[in-house]
Structure formats: structure tokens, C-alpha cells
Amino acid sequence: MRILLVEDEKKVLSFIKKGLEEEGYVVDSALDGETGLLMGLEGFHDLIILDINLPGKDGLSILQELRREKITAPVLLLTVRATIEDIVIGLDTGADDYLTKPFAFQELLARVRALLRRRVDVEEPLLRIVDLTLDPARRLVFRGEKKIELTAKEYALLAYFMRNPERVLTRTMIADHVWAYDFDPMTNVIDVYVNYLRNKIDTGYELKLIQTVRGVGYVLKVE
Ligand code: CA
């Protein structure tokens, strides 16, 4: 489960990030609104924790833009003084919950768990290209009738390909979506993982779905 945390108070940010990481979540973080929005628009977070009062762009504007761009991840708002007005605007804009500072980490964790549980219950549509199917709700992959076992990284990589069929994905794009932000796309790790994935979904099939675009990256398509 991957969480985006946008919070400009460094102390609060590291306190939340550390706590969530200890619980096994992958946490990407941003200290200002603009960066937070860009990261949120990537669309690969399972949950977004958004401080309302931020430099650059405030939390409610970010939330508005995320919802406009069809980012459906649950959003938990953090606010200092939760006036009724703030809360109503936040919930109307598409927030799922809010928490007033200061709060105990256990309280945040309880909200996070509840929101993520709710998300799992939502049926996401199947992704399909020819006979390759990915079921996001159940995290299952099939080629024809055959169930394909993937590691977490291979699954994330394939899900990214399948959400962007026919689109050339550069190593940098793949790194940004599938690996944490400090990952160096210049290593050959991505190529290694694409090959693992090919061995599982393409090897033995006449129709190959992952194509190499020499010098650029990869594309999932039917030639
Ligand atoms: Ca703040």
C-alpha cells in the first residue's frame, strides 16, 4: 500500500512518515502544495494525506484538482483549526475524512486503516489487453485461462503498463511510477524487471505484448 503525504511542517511530516513506514506502508512525501499535487496526479497512491494549510497550493485546491482529474484515492485532510466551514468544504470537495492537529499517531493510523479497507471493498474494473487480464480488486493476473504469479514489483509494473496501453513508457516514467522517488532510472533494474515480467506473460505465447522501443523504453501493445 502506497501513501502520499503532503505536509509542510517537517517535524509532523517525519513523525507521520516514520510511523507509517514502521507499519509497512510505502510513503512518498512532499513539503509543498505544488509538488504534492504533481505527485498526487501520478495516480498511483492508495491513500493521500493532505494538510490543508500549505505553501504553494493549499490542500483544498489540491483536493479539487485531484478529483477533477479523476484521482479516486481516499483523501484524509489534516487541519489545525477544523472550523465547521473547513470541514464542510473539504468533504464537499471529495475528502473522505479529516483529522484535527494535534493528534496521536494511533488515531491517524486508525483512520488510515479504515480508509484503505473501504478502498479494497470498491470494485475496480478489470484491465484487459487481448487475452491478458489484470484484476485490480483482487490483484490477480491471467493470460488466457492461465493464472500468472507475480511479485509485488512485477505486479506494479504490469499494472502501470496496462493502465497505459499503446503508450511508450520511458525508463524515467516507469521509475517514477513503480519505484520510490530516490530510485535512479539509469541503472538497469527496470530492464531486468521488464524481462522478468516478459518471461511470465509473454514467453511461450506467439503474441508478444511488451515491446521494446529502442533507446526510449517500452510499450504494451499488439503489433
Ligand atoms: Ca501546514
Image (cartoon, grey):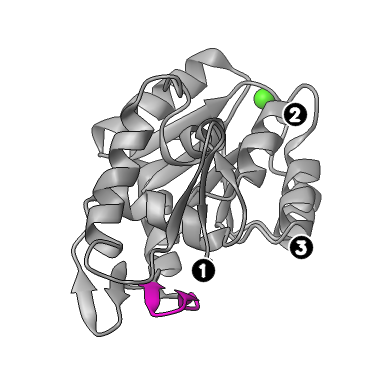
Location of residue 216 in the rendering, given as x and y in whole percent from the top left corner: 57, 34
**Residue 125 covered by magenta stretch:** yes
Q: Which residue is mark 3?
A: 92
In the drawing, does residue 167 fall left or right of residue 47? right
Above or below — where is 195 with respect to 132? above
| Quadrant housing residue 92 | bottom right
Estimate the spatial distance between the alpha carbons at disc 2 and disc 1, rounded to whole Å: 37 Å
Residue kind at label 1, given as amino acid type: Val
Residue kind at label 2, given as amino acid type: Glu
User: Over which residues does the magenta segment extend?
Assistant: 123-134
Classed neighbour count for the residue bearing mark 1: other residues with Cα under 10 Å, few (<14), some (14–19), many (≥20): few
Q: Which residue is mark 2?
A: 34
- Quarter of the rendered structure image containing ligand 1: top right
SS assignment at label 2: helix
Q: Residue at x 29, y 63 (%)?
A: 201
Estimate the spatial distance between the alpha carbons at disc 1 and disc 3, rounded to whole Å: 42 Å
Q: Nearer the viewer, mark 2 or mark 1?
A: 1
